[in-house]
Image: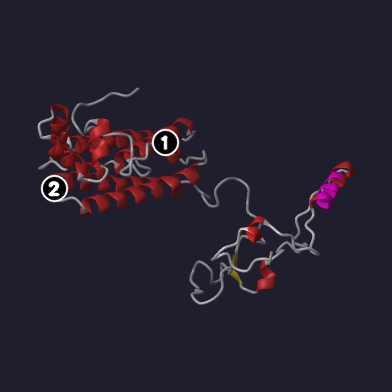
Amino acid sequence: MFTHNKHLMYTVRVSEQDPRLASLMLEQFGGPQGELAAAMRYFTQALAEEDAGRKDLLIDIATEELSHLEVIGSIVAMLTKGAKGKLAEAAEETSELYRSMTAGGESHTLSILYGGGPALINSAGQVWNAGYIDSIGDPTCDLRSNIAAEARAKIIYERLINVTGDPGVKEALGFLMTREVAHQKSFEKALYSIENNFPPGKLPGMPEYASKYYNMSQGPGDSRGPWNQGEEWEYIDHRPDQGAVDGGSGDAMATLATTEMTAINNLAERTKSRTDINPTTGADLGAGPGAGKTKAV
C-alpha cells in the first residue's frame, strides 16, 4: 500500500523561468538514469526478493526514488510555468512567442507537446521505456547493477548542477545527488553482507580459465596492472596460445544425421562460388569515376 504526503521531500525554489534548463532536467525524470527508472528497478526487484532485509531496503529506496521523481517534476514544472501561461493565453505576438518557444533546443517540445508540464521523456525527447530496467533476479547481480545505476545518476546530477545558475535549483539537485551516494552505500553494504557474493550465481567457474588474462589487443599501449598481473593472473600474450585454448582443433562442429549431412553437402555443391571465372557484373557495366579497378567491358 502506498500513501502520499503533499509536502515534497525537499523544498523546490526556482528563481527564474528557464524552459531550456527544464528540458535538461527531464534527463532525471524520464531518462535511463532517472528517478522513475530507479524506482521501477528497485520496486520490481523487491517484489521477487526472498530476503526480508533486502526486500525492505529495496522498497524503502524505491519509494524514496518516487519522491525524488516528484521533486524533479516539480522543478521542471516551475521552470516552465511562465512559458506555459504565455503559450496557453497567447500573451505575446506570434513571432515573439515562436522565438521564445524554440530558443531552447528541445524546450519547444516540452512546451508545445506537453504544455510545460514534466513528460516521461529524456532531454532528447526519447520516451521512457521499461528497457531501462536490467534486473536479472540474482541479488548479487542486481545489487551490483544498482550500485552502478546510483553512480551514473550521481554523475548526471553533477552535470546538471554545473549548468544550473539558479541557487534554489542547485540546492535541490545537490540534495538529490547526495541521496544517490547514500543509496550506493546501502547497496554496497547489502551486497557485501552476502557471503561468497562473487562470482554471481551458483555454478563455479572452470578453474583452468578463471585466472587467465588474454592479451588479445597487442601493440603500442599494452599495459600491465593489478587487473592482469601478479599471483592472481596468468598472462597469455603468445598468439598461438590464445586460440583453441581447450586443446581441440578450434573448429565448429555439429553431429548430424546422414540425411541432414547429405542435404548440407548438396546445398554447398549447388551454391559454391567458382574460382576459375571472372563474370561481368552490374558494377562493371555501370562503372564511372571513383569505381576503382573494374573488369574491362
Q: Nearer the viewer, residue 169 or 104?
A: 104
- Horizontal side, residue 125 vs residue 255: left or right: left
Q: How far is the residue under mark 1 from the one under mark 2? A: 30 Å
- Horizontal side, residue 18 vs residue 263: left or right: left
- Residue 52 visible: no
Q: Say which quadrant the N terminus sits in.
A: top left
In percent of the image, x 34 and y 34: which residue is there?
60
- Residue 217, image quadrant: bottom right
Magenta-span inclusion, residue 269 = yes
Magenta-span inclusion, residue 228 = no
Q: Position of residue 209 (x, y in %)?
A: 64, 61
Relative height, residue 192 to residue 136 (above, below): below
Q: Amino acid at mark 2?
A: Asp
Which residue position holds label 1? 129
In percent of the image, x 42 and y 34: which residue is there?
55
Q: Say which quadrant the C terminus sits in.
A: bottom right
- Give the mark, 1 or 2, whose residue is nearer the N terminus: 1
**Outermost right residue:** 258
Q: Position of residue 229 (x, y in %)?
A: 54, 71
Q: Nearer the viewer, residue 113 or 73?
A: 113
Relative height, residue 221 to residue 148 (above, below): below
In percent of the image, x 31 and y 37: which residue is there?
65
**Outermost bottom residue:** 220
Residue 139 marker:
none
- Horizontal side, residue 284 vs residue 60: left or right: right
Secondary structure category for the residue under label 2: loop
Residues shaded magenta: 263-270
Q: Nearer the viewer, residue 289 or 224?
A: 289
